[in-house]
Image (cartoon, rainbow, N blue to C red):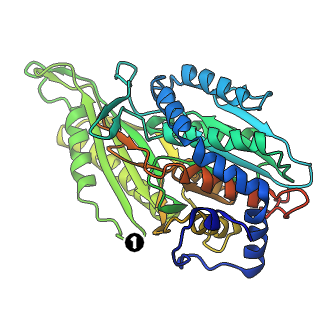
Amino acid sequence: MLSLLSISGYAQSPQSLVPIDAPLQEVFQRVTADARVVTSLQQIEEREPETVREQFRITEVPAPPFQEERRAAYYLELMRARGLDDAYIDSEGNAIGIRKGSGNGPTLLIAAHLDTVFPEDVDTRVQLRSGRYYAPGIGDDSRGLAALLSVIDVLNESGIATLGDIMFAGNVGEEGRGDLRGIKAIFRDHPEIDGFISIDGVRLRRITTGGTGSRRFEFHFKGPGGHSFGAFGLASAIHAMGRAIAKISEFETPASPKTTFTVGTVTGGTSVNSIAADAIFALDMRSNDREELARLEERAKAAALQAVAEENARWNSDEISVDFNLIGDRPVGSTPAESPIVQIAALAFDEVGIQLQQLGISSTDSNVPMSLGIPAITIAGGGNGGGSHSPGEWFAPVNSHEGPQTALLIVLALAGIEGVSPALLEERTP
């Protein structure tokens, strides 16, 4: 068998985190033995310097939360230039292109997110300092976007025909209050999708198979308001908010399944000498378990209602109230280790020569399909880096070609190669 291992001389013990089914491994070996696949893997490595340069160009196109239009338009051009002639921008702002298969296989979506956490006025120009490239968003997720383009590029030139359709997407709204809106829209509009791969960030060393869920609320306290001296005796929205925060701060949550909370921001009042008529705090609640997350939300709302009752009772009032405004909903989900998509990813790590260190749980675009029962994983785009979500974010192209190589192998094994291997991603029953 001619494979990347034999070309590059990699040698390491196979991973032991994911049990591999023998029939699946045999099919995967057919994929890696195909001469066109071997050539494509070589081309990815040879072209990696240009892939990195494109990563830098993407980084320098700002994509603030809810303002990803410029980067989406640029990414659309890049997809079309690589052979996805029918690529388009959907109603949510996602850049989508589809490489059609023979029609006898599943539909696989592979995506990287367009948005960053940084506002429009942040300087995103790439700067080289001491062997590292610095720029906000250079790794999260400009690296994923560049790796995706590398896969599209070699597939287009390879002449490989897949059984399944491969949908490529640069999606909006992964970060913060974007609330996974881009991926939610794609799965809403394309119920035919059978599996999902997200490429996100750098340092390819784990497969994300679990989705940490989150519920985010603004608790809005309202009251009559008035002058601090002349209207003294009125109940205060800020005092009620303070009572609620104090109660929530005393919550105890399980370490396993990990469940967390924080009051992240507070606002309210009009002046130091006013009894507040409005007060708002933003609450983030997360868990790796759906039931624990629901239980935490119920407790937080009950604490706020009790705080309102206590503030009203303190001043013999009924004028304080609280509204619960949902501002974020990331569903809990998971993909079992025995799922073919996880097994194939583990085999791809071995083939490329990457030590698989962990099956991880985090909050990514994969949360959405996982919660729907659709096989999904998240992997990194390769290279080294750090400082994600900070102005000091950096990237170094150390073996960064391994990211798109791994992604290519997973895609081809799942979608199947006509005349070579069956699709290992199962088509879902409508």
| Residue shown at 74% from the left, 55% from the top | 37
| Residue shown at 49% from the left, 49% from the top | 400
Horizontal relation, residue 185 to residue 273: left or right:
right
Q: Which is nearer the eye, 281 or 51?
A: 51
In the image, residue 180 lies at what x, y percent? Answer: 55, 41
Image: 361 above or below 329: below
Hey, what amino acid is under mark 1?
Ser
Q: Which is nearer the eye, 49 or 141?
A: 49
The answer to whether one can see residue 173 in this image is no
In the image, residue 34 lies at what x, y percent? Answer: 79, 61
Determine which quarter of the picture holds residue 234. top left
Quarter of the figure that contains the N terminus: bottom right
Horizontal relation, residue 169 to residue 141: left or right:
right
| Residue shown at 61% from the left, 56% from the top | 406
Q: Which is nearer the eye, 308 or 392?
A: 392
Q: Secondary structure at mark 1?
A: loop
Horizontal relation, residue 32 to residue 229: left or right:
right
Query: In the rendered picture of this protein, how many numbered marks are placed on residues?
Result: 1
The answer to whether one can see residue 80 in this image is yes
Determine which quarter of the picture holds residue 296. bottom left
The residue labelled by disc 1 is 256
In the image, residue 73 lies at what x, y percent? Answer: 62, 21
Q: Residues within 10 Å of mark 1 (few under 14, many from 20)?
A: few
Image: 107 above or below 30: above
Horizontal relation, residue 184 to residue 143: left or right:
right
In the image, residue 419 lies at what x, y percent? Answer: 91, 60
